[in-house]
Amino acid sequence: MKSALKYFAFIFGILVLGACEDKVELDFPEGETLLAVEGSISNEPGPYHISLTYTQAYFDAEIPPRATDATVFLSDDEGLQVLLEETSPGVYTYPDSGIVGRSYVLEIELPDGEQYRSNPELLREPVPILDIRWVIDEDGPSDFFDQEPDQIYGVLIDTFEPPGVGDNYRWRTFVNGVMKNDPFDITVTNDDFVDGSPVNDFDPSNELFFEGDTVTVVQERISRAALEFLQLVQSQTAFVGGPFDTPPAPIRGNVKNISDPNRNALGFFGAAGRDRATVVAGVE
């Protein structure tokens, strides 16, 4: 009898679901089209690329349209002004390195006459990485992070935080020449608790690697504005998914619309003092 009731319930469920054929059209607002800016400059040799795109509808699977034929200048506080060449659609290139101690501004004019200008970004003195080394992780790979059994090498660095509160840092990790660039890979902090102190055995990636992997760590001294921007990016991309999350909102960067203050650009133009160090996992 119980089996018959279960069978009846199953058939009834299929009939009900089959009857629900009304097509629901969801009308999502398109939102305004905004300029998105991505790029930076540092003390390392160029070239440096500034990417300009336009935003598009949330559910649009196409590649964001490029902002082509713009006039883009990079200026500094010592009188330098360089017109950037558009080396590919929407990508504008500065061929040289930045100079430590100078503040840089990005200026953009789109073909329709809209003008944008970034806030000044100071290129700070890089903080050197004093040592980089691999270590064997005794706990082994974690299933939680989807690591493979042969990934047993961690990478640690030593550095020194200069005296004077107010420094901010970002670390980028490259594995065999490819930057780890997921939201969880954003590693930033300030010097509030380590000002003027040695920083030893620091793991900038919290990742494990295979034997023979070439791991490069880039240490960047960035602005407070860049730190806060990256923290917002990570909070709205990596740390989401719960029912009580704050709805994501456009993250405004440091590029202002001179023509219309209500249409500031998204993204960020930054300047960073960089140092880098490389190690091959498992190789003496």
Image: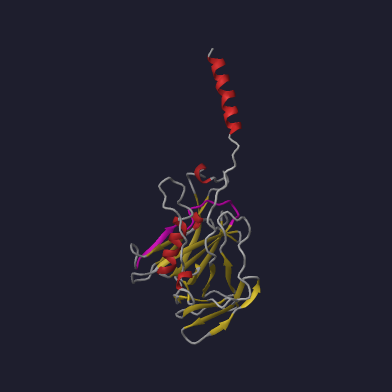
Q: Nearer the viewer, residue 95 or 269?
A: 269
In the rendering, at what x and y percent does residue 229 appear?
A: 44, 64
154 is higher (above) or lower (below) than 122: above
Q: Is residue 203 visible?
A: no
In the rendering, at what x and y percent does residue 196 appear?
A: 34, 68
Say left or right for 166 vs 117. left
The stretch drawn in magenta includes residue 71: no
Tell me what residue is drawn at x 34 percent, y 64 percent: 192
Q: Nearer the viewer, residue 18 or 227?
A: 18
Q: Which residue in the rendered view is the most extreme toward the top?
A: 1
Q: Which residue in the rendered view is the most extreme toward the right?
A: 88
Name the image quarter holding the C terminus. bottom right
**Count the marks: how many?**
0
In the rendering, at what x and y percent does residue 245 appear?
A: 42, 50
157 is higher (above) or lower (below) than 25: below
Q: Which residue in the rendered view is the most extreme toward the bottom?
A: 79
193 is higher (above) or lower (below) than 47: above
In the rendering, at what x and y percent does residue 15 appear?
A: 60, 27
Give the image quarter of residue 13.
top right
Prevailing SS of the magenta stretch: loop
Q: Nearer the viewer, residue 174 or 235?
A: 235
3 is higher (above) or lower (below) than 49: above
Tell me what residue is drawn at x 46 percent, y 84 percent: 77
The stretch drawn in magenta includes residue 206: yes
Q: Which residues are magenta?
A: 196-213
Q: Is residue 34 visible?
A: yes
Colouring chosen for the image of the structure: secondary structure
Name the image quarter holding the N terminus. top right
